[in-house]
Image (cartoon, rainbow, N blue to C red):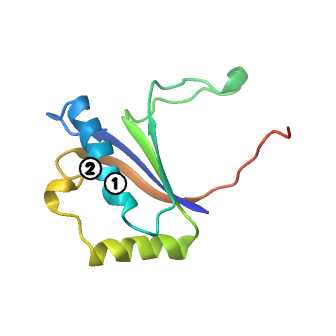
Amino acid sequence: MIKALLGYTIVDGVSEEEYERWLFDVHAPDLLANPNVDRIIFNKILYPVTSASGGTAEIPPSLDLYRIAEMHFADHDAYLAYRAWFDENPLPAERGPAGRTDFKFYLIGESTVVERDR
C-alpha cells in the first residue's frame, strides 16, 4: 500500500464550519467517486508536541496545520491511475479545493505497519 499525505490549512476568509461542510459533503464524495482510491483518512490537528516520548529529543516548532489527510492506494500504479482518472473526469472548479485549502505539502509514501501482538 502507498499513501498520498497532504498537509494543509484553511484559506483565510473560509470558516471552519464552511470548510467542514464542503470537505465531507462535497469533496470527500468527489474523491471517492474515483475507483482507484481505497480510503481517505482526515487527521484533524489538535496541537503540536514539543518533545519525543520520555523527553528523549526536543521537537522544533512545526508547521501550523489544520489537517493531514491520507489517501490510501493499493500500489503506485493505482495512484497513477487515480491521477489519470481525474484528468479524464475533472472536478468542476467550484467543487475543488482552490480558494478553500492552502496546501503545505503533498507527498507519496509507503507504509510499514507495526502492531502489538494480541
Q: Is residue 116 above or below residue 74?
A: above
Q: Is residue 19 left or right of residue 83?
A: left
Q: Is residue 11 left or right of residue 42?
A: left
Locate the N terminus by quadrant. Answer: bottom right
Measuring from the top left, give residue 14's x and y in whole percent: 17, 35
Measuring from the top left, give residue 37's x and y in whole percent: 47, 63
Disc number for residue 26:
2
CA distance for labels 2 and 1? 6 Å
Is disc 2 in contact with disc 1, using a CB cutoff of under 8 Å? yes
Measuring from the top left, give residue 32's x and y in whole percent: 39, 59
Front in this rendered view, residue 63 or 114: 114
Report which residue position mark 1 lands on: 29
What's the residue type where badge 1 is placed? Pro
Q: Is residue 30 above or below residue 57?
A: below
Residue at point 20% right, 30% down? Answer: 15
Q: Secondary structure at mark 1?
A: helix
Q: Secondary structure at mark 2?
A: helix
Label 1 crowding class (10 Å Cα cut-off): few <14, some 14-19, many 20+? Answer: few
Q: Is residue 70 above or below residue 60?
A: below
Disc number for residue 111:
none
Label 2 crowding class (10 Å Cα cut-off): few <14, some 14-19, many 20+? Answer: few
Q: Is residue 78 above or below residue 8?
A: below
What's the residue type where badge 2 is placed? Val
Residue at point 21% right, 44% down? Answer: 100
Residue at point 28% right, 45% down? Answer: 25
Judged from this view, the residue extending furthest toward the right is 117
Residue at point 64% right, 56% down? Answer: 111
